[in-house]
Image: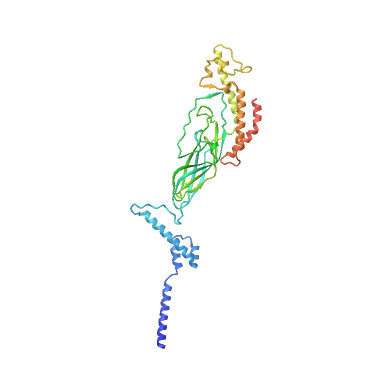
Amino acid sequence: MASLIAVGGAIIAAVIGAWAALHARRPRRADVEAVDAMSVDVGRQHDLDVVRRHDEDARALAAELLAAREWAAREQAAVHPAPHAQVPRAVSSSGEGPRVEPVDISVPERQARWMDPPVVDLKLLNRGGESAVLTKMVVEVLWARRITAFGDLLPYVDTSGGVWLPPSATYDVELPVPEKAHRARITVGISQVIGPGEADRFQVRVNTEIPPGSGYLHETPGATSLYLLRLHVVYNADSRQVPFRPLAVACPGNLLQVPTKAAIEKRIAEFRAKVDELRRAIDQEISARGMQLPDWIAKPPRSPRDLPADLATLHRGHGVNGNFWDPRGAIERFLDDAERICREISQLPPDLPDGLDRAVAMARTTLGQIPALRRAAS
């Protein structure tokens, strides 16, 4: 019995010794995973120290390691793709997909040609790890208004100008007229690709109906259409959206002409000078014929019937209009238009972007100066 006990004890001791030796040579599971994880991200030393103490964290890190190895395999396949295999999209080491953010949105104050539609300039940045494919853009109209255009004060109709020709643009959006545009949503197809960590910039031309001011395309339109827009860029198959800040545009030309005291005074002075110039030309032509000159002060002519029918001055290069025959009434109507425009602009919503808040302030200032302008013009 003693011999058996001794032999059994020796066997047990040998087994324990062998187990201890093997355990000393084999690292703990958490330590092995921590070392492997260092090849993924050497900056996570603090996390690795925690991993060594907690097996649960070690298992999570193992899952991250597996994802990193799968990414490496995809990268290798991209370098040496199999025949007819689709090359995968570029992916960051973190496995993050595309993440497009707005950088800036703007519209120039004036176009190269004042009747051109405004062009919106968009800048985006992809902070994600995959390429982003921009598929469409949604234009939401927050509000829209029609503002009477501040036209010229002329004693004749000028027909010598050029006809407006629209320029080319990257993308075009057609907005409804202001009366039908409230809360409208217009979708425009686009085709842009932004790589990981890259930026992109493209433009959108805003078109809308331009109400005519008279019978000539090149003259001042009858009204300016104001829009407050919000643009959303949609990308990738899951239709993620990039919303931009609200943007104010004016059509045509992104120009909202606000009457000011100085501008009104200048146009009235120019109008009077042109009326006097036409009167002198008529006097010279009538005097050359030996006829009696008209009395422009006490009894001015009120229509072409009050002058010789064949006067070349009335038809040379332009035809005189009703303003020439009634200068005082023309100035009064001009001031009425200026007052109406200032009231329309003054009633716009407060805190508008892109300079419209300054336009509202200017219009309110001019509105208070109209009575003095009327007295000076009478």
Please identify the quadrant where the C terminus is shown. top right
Report the front residue among 50 and 70: 70
Residue 33 position within the rendered picture, expressed as x and y whole percent measured from the top left: 44, 65
Left or right of residue 270: residue 61: left
Q: Residue furthest left?
A: 83
Q: Quadrant of residue 135?
A: top left
Residue 133 position within the rendered picture, expressed as x and y whole percent measured from the top left: 44, 48
Q: Residue furthest bottom?
A: 1
Q: With respect to residue 70, does 203 lie above or below?
A: above
Q: Residue furthest top?
A: 290
Report the front residue among 180 and 335: 180
Q: With respect to residue 124, does 277 lie above or below?
A: above
Please identify the quadrant where the N terminus is shown. bottom left
Residue 9 position within the rendered picture, expressed as x and y whole percent measured from the top left: 42, 83
Q: Residue furthest front?
A: 180
The structure residue drawn at horizontal position 41% and vertical position 83%, both measured from the top left corner, is 8
Q: With respect to residue 238, does 7 lie above or below?
A: below
Report the front residue among 286 and 214: 214
Q: Quadrant of residue 293?
A: top right
Residue 40 position within the rendered picture, expressed as x and y whole percent measured from the top left: 44, 60
Please count the marks in the image: 0
Q: How is the image coloured?
A: rainbow
